[in-house]
Each structure stands twice: as C-alpha cells, then as structure tokens.
Image: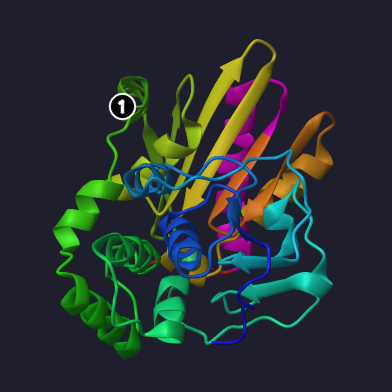
Amino acid sequence: MDLIRPGLKTLFLSHQNADPDAVGCLFFLQRRYHGDIALPNQPDRKGKPLAEYLGLDYMLPPFEMNYEQYVVVDTPNPGQLDPIEVPLDRTVIIDHHPNNGWDTQVYNEGRTSCAEMIYDMFSPDDLTKEEGVALVAGILTDTSGLSRGTRETFLTLSSIMEATDVSISEVHSIISSKRTYSERICRLKGAERSAHVREKGFLIAYTYVNSFESSVAEMLLRAGADISFSGSQRDDEFLISARVLNDAVEKGIDMGELFHETANEHPNISGGGHPGAAVLKGKGDVNEYMDILVRRTRESIRDKGLSNL
Ligand SMILES: [Mn+2]
C-alpha cells in the first residue's frame, strides 16, 4: 500500500469528538506505520473508552507540526480538525463520507466506515486481537450497531472476526460506557417534565432541564417523538437543543434551517446546525423561545405541506 509512505516522520489525525471509527483507525495505522497521533479535542463518549482500552497515546493542541507526512482519517472536511491545520502538500486523506469538503484528493472507496477501508487496504494476515477490537468498534459505530451497512461491510466484519476471535458483544461492552449519574438524573427529569403536541402526524416533544440538553433531546426521540426540544435557563441566558428522527428529516424537516432563521430574526441569539440536530442560544427566556420554536415548527410543517400520517 503506497498511499502512506513508510519511513517518514508521520502524524496521524482525526476529527473533533473522535468516535470509535476514528480512534480505531488511528490505532491500527499507528501499529502498522509508527508515528504520532493527534486529535483536536478529547474523543467522544464511545471513542474515549475505546482509546483507553487500546492504550492509545494521543496529543491535543497545541503541539509542534514538524512532520514529514500527515495522515487524516474519517474527517469529511478540514474544519473538523480545527484548531489543527495540516499542510495539504504533505497530507494523505482517507475518508468514507459521501460528501467531503477537502480541496485535495481524498482516498475514498465509499464504504460504510473507515475501518472497513483500512482493513481492506491491508488485509493483514497477522491481525492482533486489539487491532480486531479497534476495527470492529469502528464498524459497529458507523453501522449504528449493525443496523446499516452493505454486503461488503459484513464480509469485512466477518473476516476480521474470523482472524481475531473478537466478538460483537465484547466490543459493545468496551465502547458502551455508562452515562454519569447527573446525566441520568437530567434525562429522567426531562422525561418527567416533557409535553408534546401533534402536527400532521409528527409528534413534537419538548422539555426543560438544567444541563445535558442534547442528550435529553435524543432521549425524547427514543421515547417516540419525531422532533424534540430540550431547553435550559442559566441566569439570563437560555439554550435549546433539538433533534429530529432521520425519517422526519427525509420527509423534509430541517431544524438547522429553522434555528438559523429564528436566530437571524432576534437580537443576541445564535443558532443553526444540521437538519436533524440544532442548537439555539443567547440572552432571553427559555419558555418564550421554546414557544417560538414549537410554533414555527408546526407552521413550517404546514407551509411545506409535510405529512407523517
Ligand atoms: Mn466514520
């Protein structure tokens, strides 16, 4: 595999809030090529326990960028490395996301995870148990626990499992860290205080908490909402986090757009995000902004002629 040049002083990098696909690929590549690893910030809730299990040694900014070669994995655009900036003329990019914002060539075989691509690049016959855990964890996460993936995904997964005797349940238990006590209390309180309305078959749930807004919004989706809002008030500032089911996004709900428009119409408010996940925050009363968001969501469902019936 001559995409990555062996023997050079190399830095392996991946995206902010690194997930198990990022962490697993970095571990595997470092094992095979040697070099250092850096991340823009700490890994996410599943990436962190995987990094601990693997004993992954990584740097966080600031550090010296004096490498001969940079290898970026699982990162769809340079902004995801912020505040790290890589010199493109010395950088190899390996990614699997369908749309990426790099201004240079990207090695992308359109697979479900980077872990699959990297395994298939080498097809090593001396895969260690830890390398197996690293790659299986990446596949598990990027297939949402095997609920998505192509035929190739499962063929690759099967070869890794055969070569290393790693089991799915074993990897699950490594990456599923328990939520903290305070997060669990917030989720329970959020459930207790939640209310919901219906619009053209879409269930819109909203609630108020003291923190963990996005976790609580996510929980409301799992409880049955199509669209959820979770808001908090801290002194004179509020924050509202929204989540939308994929199915509702496909039907045309775009919370990032709605939050962005709402922010533009009110002073001292910022907001935006993706169709399925958005945040609105600033000076003001959380109840007032919750009312605005729920009302605008209902209006936008009607205006766009969307239906979930
Ligand atoms: Mn990935």
Quadrant of residue 215 within the rendered picture: top left
Dot 1: few (<14), some (14–19), or many (≥20) neighbours within 10 Å?
A: some
Badge 1 marks a residue whose secondary structure is helix
Residue 265 locus on image (x, y percent): 82, 41
Q: Is residue 150 above or below residue 298?
A: below
Residue 69 locus on image (x, y percent): 72, 68
Magenta stretch, residue numbers = 281-304
Q: Residue at x 64, y 67 (%)?
A: 71
Instruction: Name the residue beneath numbered marker 1.
Output: 184
Residue 292 inside the magenta-drawn segment:
yes
Toward the top, the furthest residue is: 235
Task: Identify the main secondary structure in magenta.
Answer: helix
Please state which of residues 24 and 253 is positioned toward the viewer in this rendering: 24
Q: Residue at x 60, y 87 (%)?
A: 2
Residue 90 locus on image (x, y percent): 78, 71
Residue 251 inside the magenta-drawn segment:
no
